[in-house]
Amino acid sequence: MKMNVGTVDRIARIAIGLTLLSLPFWLDAPWRWAGLIGVMPFMTGLSGRCPAYHLLGRSTCAARKPE
């Protein structure tokens, strides 16, 4: 699968993922483990590949100039 997540999108995904992953450490509510959903945006941000974008034919990567 080609990279389909642009730089700004990757930074946002990593930040959101880390924030969600930190919830179990900060919250005392019974639903705090829902923060583990942050694994998905964190991993897609690190890899630069999003399966949902691939299925939808979307990409946030900048267009590359032909060489």
Image (cartoon, rainbow, N blue to C red):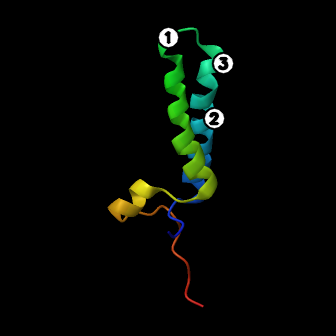
Position of 53 relative to 2 (above/below): above
Closer mark to the observer between disc 2 and disc 1: 1
In which quadrant of the rendered view does residue 47 lie? bottom right
Label 1 SS: helix
Q: Which mark is residue 30?
A: 1
> In x, y percent, where is residue 62?
53, 68
Q: Nearer the viewer, residue 35 or 12?
A: 35
Give the structural element (helix, strand or loop) at label 3. Answer: helix
Of callouts 1 and 3, the N-terminal one:
3
Residue visible at 53% across and 21% down? 33
Q: Secondary structure at mark 2?
A: helix
On the image, the x and y values in percent for residue 41 come to 53, 44
Q: What amino acid is at disc 1?
A: Pro
| Residue at mark 2 | 18
Front position in the image: 1 or 20: 1
Question: Which residue is tagged 3?
Answer: 25
